[in-house]
C-alpha cells in the first residue's frame, strides 16, 4: 500500500488533501534532472533568469482567488488578509533587481601589473528548500527565487500542513516556461528527507522550522559538507520606553503578537514596558486585543482563525495554565466556540504578573499569547530580552533613534526594529543568533549564502 501524506484542515478537521509520497526511483530521477538542468542554467545570463522569475510571480498572483481560501483551509489564516502576495512580490522583485550587482565578480583591491585577479560567485548546484506552513509562500520564496537567480536548481519539500503550496509553485514555474528540472516539488516523509540530505546529492539545504527539526537536518547532513541555512525558533521581545508614541506602540504590538494567530517567526511573544508607562500600555493593549473576532477563517468578519493544528493550541493552553498557577493574571478570557482541549480554535490572551520562571516568557509559544512585564530601566530590559535561547528580532519603541541603536547594539538578535515589528525588508539580511539558527536570507548577503566563492588568479601572457 502506497504511503501518503494527509493534510488535516484546522477549519473542520477534515482531510483537505492527500498525496502519495515520492518513490526512491522518483527522488533519484528528480535529483538527476536537477543536476543536468542546472549545468545549462548556470550559463544563462542573469537578466534572462530574472525574466523567468517575474513570469513565475505573475502566474502565481494570477491564482490568488484560488490560493487565498486554500491557505485558510490548509493552515487557518482568515481570507480577509488576502494571502501573502504583497510580500512575495516585494521579495521576488527586489532579489531579481539586485541580482546582477550582488553576483558580479569581486575584483582584488590591490591591482598588480601583469595579473588579473578576482573572485566569482558561482552557483552551489542543487539547493533543497524545506519550507514551513506558517507563511508557506513567503518563507519558501526567500530561498527559491535567489537560489535560481544565482544559477542553482531547486528542489522544494513543503510542510505536510501546506501540501498544496508546492504544487502552486510548480504550476507557476511551469506556466513561466522555466526549463524542466530546475524547479521540482517533491512530497517526502521525514525518513526520505533525511536520506536525501545524507546522500551527498544536495549541495545546500534551507530549512525553516523548529530547533529540533534543525538539529535533525544537521545530523542528516553530517559528513556531506553541504552548506546550511537554518531559521529555527524565536521568542521575540519588545521594549516600550517612556517616550514611545503609545497609541502607535499598542496597535502595532498587538498586531505583532496576534496576527496569523501568533504563528509568526518574528511575532512578538514578550513585552517589557518601562514602569512610567506600564499601566497606560497594558490598558491599551488589553482593549485592542479584545477587538479580535475568532472563528471560521473563510468568513470575512473573522480576524483570527484557528491555529494550524490542535496540538499547537494545546501548548498555549498549557503555558497559560502554568503561568496562572505561578501567579500571573489573564486579562482577556474571551469565550470562543470550540475553544477547548484538542481543538485548534483559541482566543488571544494577555498575561501580566509574569516572570522568567514561567515557560510563556522563555519557551517559544508560536501562538496567540503574550506576557507583559514592568521594568525599571534599560539595563533590566536588556537583561530580560537577552534571557532567552533565541535571537531573531527585537523591537524597541521610542522617539530617540540613537537611544534605540545603543540598546539594539546590546541585544542578542538578528534584527533590531524601532517602532515596528514582525516584518521582513528584502533589502536587509534575515538572520538569527543562538538557537534561532544560522545562515542568512534576502539582501545581497543572501546571495553570498547561496553561492560559493571561486578565485581566478590569472597571469597575463609574458
Image (cartoon, helix red, strand yellow):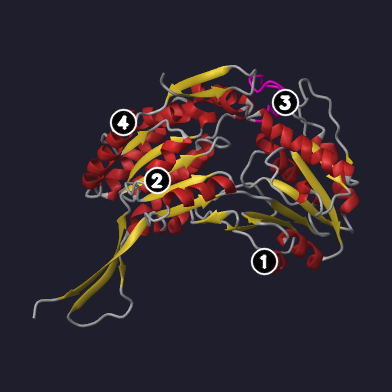
Question: In the figure, 93 relative to 314: above or below?
Answer: below
Identity of the residue drawn at 51% across and 22% down: 65
Identity of the residue drawn at 44% across and 55% down: 446
Which region of the structure is painted magenta? 294-307
Judging by the rendered image, the residue that carries numbered circle 4 is 26
Judged from this view, the residue extending furthest toward the front is 1
Res. 434 in view: yes
Taking the image as shown, residue 247 lies to the left or right of residue 67, namely right
Judging by the rendered image, the residue that carries numbered circle 2 is 197
Position of residue 436 measured from the top left corner of the image (x, y, whole percent): 59, 53
Mark number, residue 342: 3
Position of residue 384 measured from the top left corner of the image (x, y, whole percent): 77, 60
Q: Secondary structure under badge 3?
A: loop
Q: Are marks 1 and 4 in contact (CB under 8 Å)?
A: no
Q: Secondary structure under badge 4?
A: helix
**Crowdedness of circle 3 by 10 Å Cα count: few (<14), some, many (20+)?**
few
Identity of the residue drawn at 33% across and 49% down: 200
Pick the front one: 253 or 182: 182
Question: In the figure, 67 relative to 441: above or below?
Answer: above
Question: In the figure, 398 relative to 50: above or below?
Answer: below
Q: In the image, which is nearer the foreground, mark 1 or mark 2?
A: 2
Judging by the rendered image, the residue that carries numbered circle 1 is 405
Q: Is residue 301 on the magenta stretch?
A: yes
Judged from this view, the residue extending furthest toward the bottom is 113
Amino acid at each position: 500500500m502506497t504511503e501518503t501524506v494527509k493534510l488535516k484542515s484546522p477549519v473542520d478537521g477534515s482531510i483537505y488533501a492527500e498525496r502519495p509520497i515520492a518513490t526512491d526511483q522518483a527522488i533519484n530521477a528528480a535529483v538527476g534532472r536537477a543536476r543536468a538542468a542546472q549545468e545549462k542554467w548556470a550559463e544563462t545570463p542573469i537578466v534572462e533568469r530574472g525574466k523567468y522569475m517575474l513570469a513565475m510571480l505573475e502566474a502565481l498572483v494570477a491564482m490568488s482567488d484560488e490560493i487565498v481560501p486554500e491557505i485558510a483551509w490548509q493552515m487557518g489564516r482568515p481570507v480577509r488578509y488576502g494571502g501573502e502576495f504583497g510580500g512575495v512580490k516585494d521579495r521576488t522583485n527586489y532579489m531579481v533587481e539586485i541580482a546582477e550587482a550582488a553576483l558580479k565578480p569581486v575584483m582584488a583591491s590591490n591591482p598588480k601589473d601583469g595579473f588579473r585577479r578576482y573572485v566569482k560567485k558561482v552557483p552551489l548546484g542543487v539547493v533543497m528548500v524545506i519550507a514551513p506552513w506558517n507563511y508557506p509562500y513567503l518563507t519558501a520564496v526567500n530561498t527559491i527565487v535567489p537560489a535560481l537567480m544565482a544559477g542553482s536548481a531547486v528542489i522544494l519539500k513543503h510542510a505536510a500542513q501546506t501540501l498544496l503550496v508546492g504544487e502552486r509553485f510548480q504550476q507557476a514555474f511551469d506556466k513561466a516556461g522555466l526549463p524542466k528540472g530546475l524547479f521540482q516539488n517533491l512530497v517526502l516523509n521525514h525518513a526520505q528527507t533525511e536520506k536525501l540530505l545524507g546522500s551527498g546529492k544536495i549541495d545546500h539545504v534551507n530549512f525553516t522550522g523548529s530547533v529540533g527539526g534543525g538539529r535533525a537536518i544537521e545530523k542528516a547532513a553530517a559528513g556531506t559538507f553541504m552548506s546550511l541555512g537554518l531559521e529555527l525558533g524565536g521568542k521575540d521581545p519588545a521594549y516600550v520606553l517612556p517616550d514611545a508614541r503609545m497609541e502607535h506602540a499598542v496597535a502595532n504590538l498587538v498586531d505583532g503578537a496576534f496576527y496569523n494567530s501568533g504563528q509568526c517567526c518574528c511575532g512578538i511573544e514578550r513585552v517589557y514596558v518601562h514602569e512610567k508607562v506600564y499601566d497606560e500600555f497594558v490598558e491599551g493593549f488589553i482593549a485592542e486585543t479584545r477587538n479580535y473576532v475568532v472563528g471560521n477563517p473563510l468568513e470575512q468578519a473573522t480576524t483570527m482563525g484557528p491555529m494550524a493544528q490542535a496540538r499547537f493550541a494545546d501548548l498555549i493552553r498549557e503555558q497559560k495554565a502554568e503561568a496562572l498557577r505561578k501567579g500571573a493574571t489573564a486579562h482577556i478570557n474571551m469565550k470562543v466556540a470550540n475553544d477547548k482541549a484538542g481543538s485548534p480554535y483559541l482566543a488571544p490572551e494577555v498575561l501580566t504578573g509574569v516572570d522568567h520562571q514561567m515557560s510563556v516568557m522563555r519557551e517559544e509559544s508560536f501562538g496567540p499569547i503574550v506576557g507583559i512585564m514592568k521594568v525599571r530601566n534599560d539595563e533590566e530590559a536588556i537583561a530580560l530580552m537577552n534571557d532567552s535561547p533565541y535571537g531573531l528580532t527585537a523591537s524597541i519603541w521610542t522617539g530617540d533613534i540613537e537611544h534605540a541603536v545603543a540598546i539594539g547594539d546590546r541585544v542578542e538578535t538578528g534584527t533590531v526594529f524601532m517602532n515596528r515589528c514582525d516584518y521582513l525588508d528584502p533589502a536587509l539580511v534575515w538572520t538569527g543568533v543562538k538557537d534561532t539558527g544560522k545562515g542568512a536570507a534576502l539582501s545581497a548577503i543572501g546571495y553570498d549564502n547561496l553561492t560559493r566563492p571561486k578565485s581566478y588568479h590569472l597571469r597575463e601572457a609574458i
